[in-house]
Amino acid sequence: MFEITNNKVMLRGKLKDDFAFYEERDGKKFYKGTVAVKSLQRRYEDQIDVLINEEQLLERENAYKKIEIKGEIELNKDKCNVLAQKLHYLKEEYEPDLNFIFLEAYVIRKPWKKGQNVILAISLKSQQNSPYIKCVCSGNIAKRVSGIQVCKKVKLDGKIVSKRRKEGYINEVLVCQIEQ
């Protein structure tokens, strides 16, 4: 079995919901907040949940609401969170919003079509019942994805997008590039 070696996320946007206690893991407290990232092609901002440990939270500067996060995707009960490893507060007028991921993952369900797009379910583990995130692929990428087999490891570049649902927002990955 291959090991996941690349899981990188970079976000820059406004802190929409301030960090509040979320859970405790191995004696460390984690806090969850929401970052709103503007998208050029869409009418609304993507709402992305971010987890941060207490030590990083204590180092924060309250003067600015615009933040830059470097971290990794964490899949938990079919939800996608960004686990922050570095957090910087920025002056709003100088930094444009940014949303980028580079991820190695496993295909855990056969790709299926939804309108013009192909949906791919990927996970950080190769087991069929592990938590996953939906990836939306269109155009030439959709043609390549339709031939990918289950349990195949893929590398993808893309961004996290949010979709509105009755119960709130859910996150998916919009794939910009994929390779096996």
Image (cartoon, helix red, strand yellow):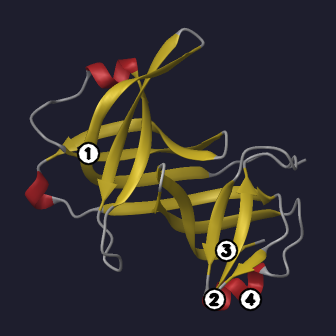
- As measured in the structure, the alpha-carbon distance from the residue carrying label 1 to the one carrying label 4 is 37 Å
In the rendered image, which residue does mark 2 sit on? 116
The residue beneath circle 3 is 178
Query: Between marks 2 and 3, how big is the CA–CA gap?
Result: 18 Å
In the image, residue 7 above or below residue 158: above
Considering only order in the chain, which callout, 3 or 1, is on the residue closer to the N terminus? Answer: 1
Determine whether the residue tagged by mark 2 lies in a helix, strand or loop.
loop
Q: Residue at x 51, y 59 (%)?
A: 101
Helix, strand, or loop for circle 1? strand
Residue 130 in picture, x, y percent from top left: 79, 43
Upstream in sequence: badge 1 or badge 4: 1
Q: Kindly report the distance in space between the C-alpha atoms of the residues bearing marks 2 and 1.
A: 32 Å
Q: Which of marks 1 and 2 precedes in the sequence?
A: 1
Distance CA(mark 4)–CA(mark 2): 11 Å
Residue bearing the label numbered 1:
16
Residue with the mark numbered 4: 143
- Disc 2 or disc 3, which is closer to the eye? 2
